[in-house]
Image (cartoon, rainbow, N blue to C red):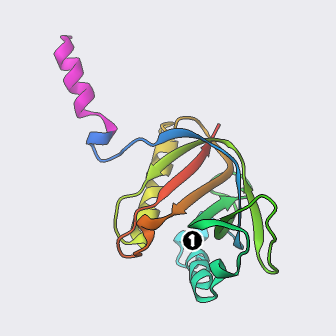
Amino acid sequence: MPLRIIVWFLVLTSPSLVGETLPKKIHQRGFSVVGVAVRTTNAKEMSGEGVIPKQWQKFFQDGIQQKIPDKVDGTIYAVYTDYASDRNGEYSFVIGVKVNPNATVPAGMALRKIPAGDYAVLTSDKGPVSKVVPAAWQQIWSLEDKHQLGGPRAYRADFEVYDQRAADPRNSQVDVYVGVK
């Protein structure tokens, strides 16, 4: 087969050209997050009986971010951790902020340590957060099924970063960090 046909085939079948961008792989230093935690499953979240939207509502209505001492900055983190197994099992979902290493944990809140390690980072499309974040996770699961995350998932901790690009919930962009081995 001539080289130019092979090149055109690779260009035309490149994931970034057919609507699926491959995540970049980075090494992330460990850090701690304090926030509100709940246990759930993806099946529960997709059934219409999910608790994640209620956690977001609680986080903002109860002013949780303002009640957390020792904050590093104003970036909000949604952390998925304490996995029972894989994406089909139970996990803890924590909404909070990055804190100093010896942070005080207020009553009713939880501290989660994000381990140092390799992470596949996928940036969501820009749009309503209620649409772009679930779409990013759908893409992550698809890439996981195709072994295109840069390694098998570690299922130790994954997290979403809600920085200044997510200030407007109707027009947000979020980075999703997925722990890989």
**Residue 82 shows up from this direction:** no
User: Which image quadrant is residue 11 in?
Assistant: top left
Looking at the image, is 84 positioned above or below residue 11? Answer: below
Q: Nearer the viewer, residue 34 or 181?
A: 34
The residue sitting at the bottom extreme is 61
User: Which image quadrant is residue 36 in?
Assistant: bottom right
Q: Which residue is mark 1?
A: 45
Residue for point 49% across, 64% down: 163
Image position of 102 (left or right of 57): right
Q: Nearer the viewer, residue 43 or 74?
A: 74
Type of amino acid under label 1: Glu
Expressed as whole percent of the image width and height from the top left, the position of residue 46 reads 52, 70
User: Which image quadrant is residue 94 in?
Assistant: bottom right
Q: Nearer the viewer, residue 121 or 105?
A: 105
Looking at the image, is 103 positioned above or below residue 16? Answer: below
Expressed as whole percent of the image width and height from the top left, the position of residue 155 reads 67, 49
Quadrant in which the N terminus appears? top left
Q: Is residue 112 magenta?
A: no
Residue stretch in magenta: 1-15
Main SS class of the magenta portion in the image: helix
Looking at the image, is 126 positioned above or below residue 5? Answer: below
Dot 1: element: helix
The residue sitting at the top extreme is 2
Disc 1 packing (10 Å; few <14; some 14–19; many ≥20): few
Expressed as whole percent of the image width and height from the top left, the position of residue 158 reads 62, 54
Residue for point 42% across, 60% down: 135
Image position of 53 (left or right of 133): right
Quadrant in which the C terminus appears? top right
Residue for point 69% across, 44% down: 116
**Residue 85 shows up from this direction:** yes
Looking at the image, is 56 positioned above or below residue 91? Answer: below
Q: Is residue 14 magenta?
A: yes
